[in-house]
Image (spheres, grey):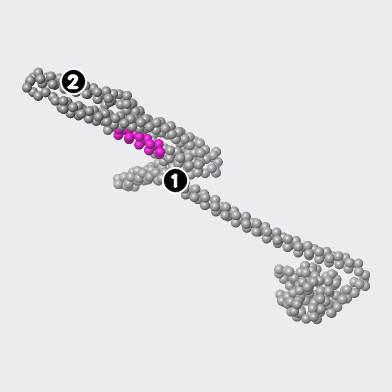
Amino acid sequence: MCSVRTLRRISCGFVTVILGCTALAANYEQTPVSPEEVRRQSTQDELADRRQAEQLDLVRQTTQFLYMRALTTKEMFTKLKQQTESFFSRMETLLQSDEGKRLGLDPIGARFYQGLKDYPTVTMVEIEERAQAVSALVNRLESFQSGPAIALPPSQETQDQVNEQYFWVRSRLNEIQEDIGKLNDTVRQATSDFDPAKAKTLQVLLEELDAQFDRTLIDYRMLGEKKATKEVKQIVIDAAYLRRVERANAEEQIRRRQMEAELAHKKAEVETAVSNQLIAAQQRQFEAEKKYTDALAEIERLRKQAEVDRQVADIDADLQRDAKLTDAEKKQKIALAQSSEVAELLAPFLTPGYWQVGAPSASYEKQPLSFSQIVAKGALNQTSEGLQALLTIGINRNDKIRPRWGFRHRLKDLSEPEHEQLHKAQEYLINLGPTMVELGLLAK
């Protein structure tokens, strides 16, 4: 900048001297150039030099910015080419791989793949052509950088070309990255519950879909040619075109809905997991409560069974002891068992009938009460509870045939004579029960 300003000042000085000499030689009467005029001219020249320097600096900055943008665009094209080649290679591999078979089992996934294949975001031809154009722009701007300084920036056409290529490659790079991500997500979400050896490849499935669609078009076209006029034929053609447009629109909608579907899927997974955990917790609680209830019931059953077994064992022991009784003792028990006093007091037990203690239904034929059931009911326990159980059997209103005791329902409400009578009945059953079973007065 300083050299240009100095040269201009020197040249202005020479021009002033030459003009002054020429004027003096041509006309001695002309007024010579004054020092003020020389200084004014010099100031104007200096302002012009400054404006030119600022213009050159602005051009340099513009060219530098454009050159750097072109270099960035070139690098982005290299990255776009690499990712697009990798994407197309992955698409080609899916046509024959087990992952592709998984994808083919999902109708939406297969259509999504077909949309990516039929309507790619970018082609390798586009990338190659545009990459070459960007390389030419880089070389052109590089020549601006290395050449002599000029006051004119790159043409508006060159600037527009650089900017257009930059925004194009940036947009396509984002789109191809989205396609790669969506394809990976779709493959990952596809079902894995299938037999790869029996499943069709994705290529076969897509060919079948295309063949089915083409057959449908042919059938409609043939039907239209047979039945319809020229207008109907045109309708079939328009329908086929509309079908392709609709398919393209549907595939585009699938792309736009991928994010929403993914969010909905994740939300459903979380809700399902929470619901499953809640159901599992409730199921575990129910099972624990059931096990606890069953355990209590089993303990109670075993306790009752042990009590019955003990009483039966006692009875067996009594039977064995009775077997050892002398004939006189046995005859004495038989006589007492067959006495009118015992028959009258134990009439609710000895009289044949259909009702039985603890039985869910009536017996097939009339018979006395079962001695073992009386024992199992605890009616022969020599306790207040045993007496209450015996009283309950003797006054039970479900027995419609046998005579009933006229006692009150609760042991504590009985009079002293009634209480003695009940106690006597229990003693008879305890002492004479096995003998009565032998005689048939009581059922076993």
Residue located 19% across and 23% down the image:
12
Could you tell me if residue 138 is visible in this image? yes
Could you tell me if residue 118 is visible in this image? no
Mark 1: few, some, or many residues within 10 Å (few <14, many ≥20)? few
Query: Label 2, on which residue?
Result: 14
Q: Which residues are magenta?
A: 158-175
Q: Nearer the viewer, residue 287 or 364?
A: 287
Mark 2: few, some, or many residues within 10 Å (few <14, many ≥20)? few
Q: CA distance from mark 1 to mark 2?
A: 77 Å
Query: Label 1, on which residue?
Result: 259
288 left or right of 310 in image = left
In the figure, 5 relative to 346: above or below?
A: above
35 left or right of 300 in image = left
Q: Nearer the viewer, residue 10 or 122?
A: 10
Q: Which quarter of the rendered picture does the N terminus lie within?
A: top left
Q: Nearer the viewer, residue 11 or 411?
A: 11
268 left or right of 140 in image = right
Residue located 16% across and 25% down the image:
35
Q: Which quarter of the rendered picture does the C terminus lie within?
A: bottom right
| Residue 255, horizontal then vertical, whole percent | 42, 44
Q: Amino acid at mark 2?
A: Phe
| Residue 208, horizontal then vertical, whole percent | 45, 40
The verdict on residue 435 being magenta is no
Q: Earlier in the sequence, mark 1 or mark 2?
A: 2
Quarter of the view holding residue 367: bottom right
The verdict on residue 162 being magenta is yes
199 left or right of 51 in image = right
| Residue 97, horizontal then vertical, whole percent | 50, 36
